[in-house]
Amino acid sequence: QSVLTQPPSASGTPGQRVTISCSGSSSNIGSNTVNWYQQLPGTAPKLLIYSNNQRPSGVPDRFSGSKSGTSASLAISGLQSEDEADYHCGAWDDSLHGPVFGGGTKLTVL
Amino acid sequence: EVQLVESGGGLIQPGGSLRLSCAASGFIFSDYWMHWVRQAPGKGLVWVSRIDSDGGSSVYADSVKGRFTSSRDNAKNTLYLQMNSLRAEDTAVYYCARHVSDYTNNVDRDWFDPWGQGTLVTVSS
């Protein structure tokens, strides 16, 4: 059971906007920044969003992140077939002295 | 190009030992904390361990404490994970990841980038 809570699945049609939620507690999301990682099928996780809402170079602006209190969200607009992947949220946890992750959300593009 | 390449995974019997390696290139390895994160088949990411930049301090998840040891050789730009007393529940793909941190405007920001390609450890008789 993961420390951060994500829905196991999400879906949308091409061009749609989808959001994925991530819920935590005061010791992790409530007091630290949130990161999102994209894991394409059969590959390693890759940094998608860092520091709540920052995109690394090369990540399209269709991807955006936000945080409020002990929850965070990843939004994907203009959904494309290549966005089909698992999305994981992560944050540092002050109680565990290490990072914690969500269980991952499998995004299906219908 | 900043890159991490893991090796050393394989099939091992319960109770056995295995050592994973993670070769770093494209950045000053000795400047960064490094982590091991694992992912059981069909499951989410689970943090395993962290080692600081000079190898003087390591922290472990409770599930591996006392069985796993993280170390590094900064001269060889390589991170290691020694895994002893392996159990079936240790079966997973193991990733190494670089810890990037930034402290600006009194806010601590931490993230993992990049991740290695992963190495599969299967514990089974």
Image: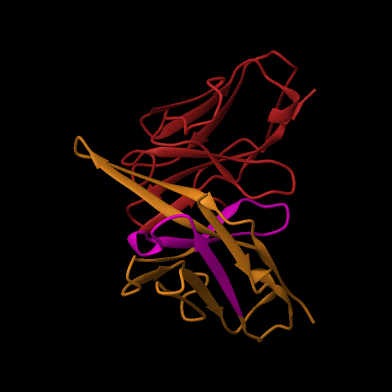
Q: Looking at the picture, does residue A76 appear above or below residue B78?
A: above
The residue depicted at 39 percent of the width and 42 percent of the height is A25
Residue A90 as seen in the image, left or right of residue B103: right
Range drawn in magenta:
B19-47
Chain in red (letter)? A
Residue B16 as seen in the image, left or right of residue B23: right
Quarter-of-image position of residue A77? top right
- Residue farthest to the left? B106
Q: Looking at the picture, does residue B57 appear above or below residue B5?
A: below
How far from the left and from the top, in percent, is residue A65?
A: 47, 27
How far from the left and from the top, in percent, is residue A26?
A: 34, 42
Camera-side residue of B20 and B4? B4
Magenta residue check for B65:
no
Camera-side residue of A104 and B99? B99
The residue depicted at 34 percent of the width and 38 percent of the height is A30
Total residue callouts: 0
How far from the left and from the top, in percent, is residue A75?
A: 55, 23
Camera-side residue of A80 and A58? A58
Which quadrant holds the C terminus of chain A? top right
The residue depicted at 54 percent of the width and 29 percent of the height is A59
Q: Looking at the picture, does residue A2 appear above or below residue A8?
A: below
Chain in orange (letter)? B
How far from the left and from the top, in percent, is residue B80?
A: 51, 74
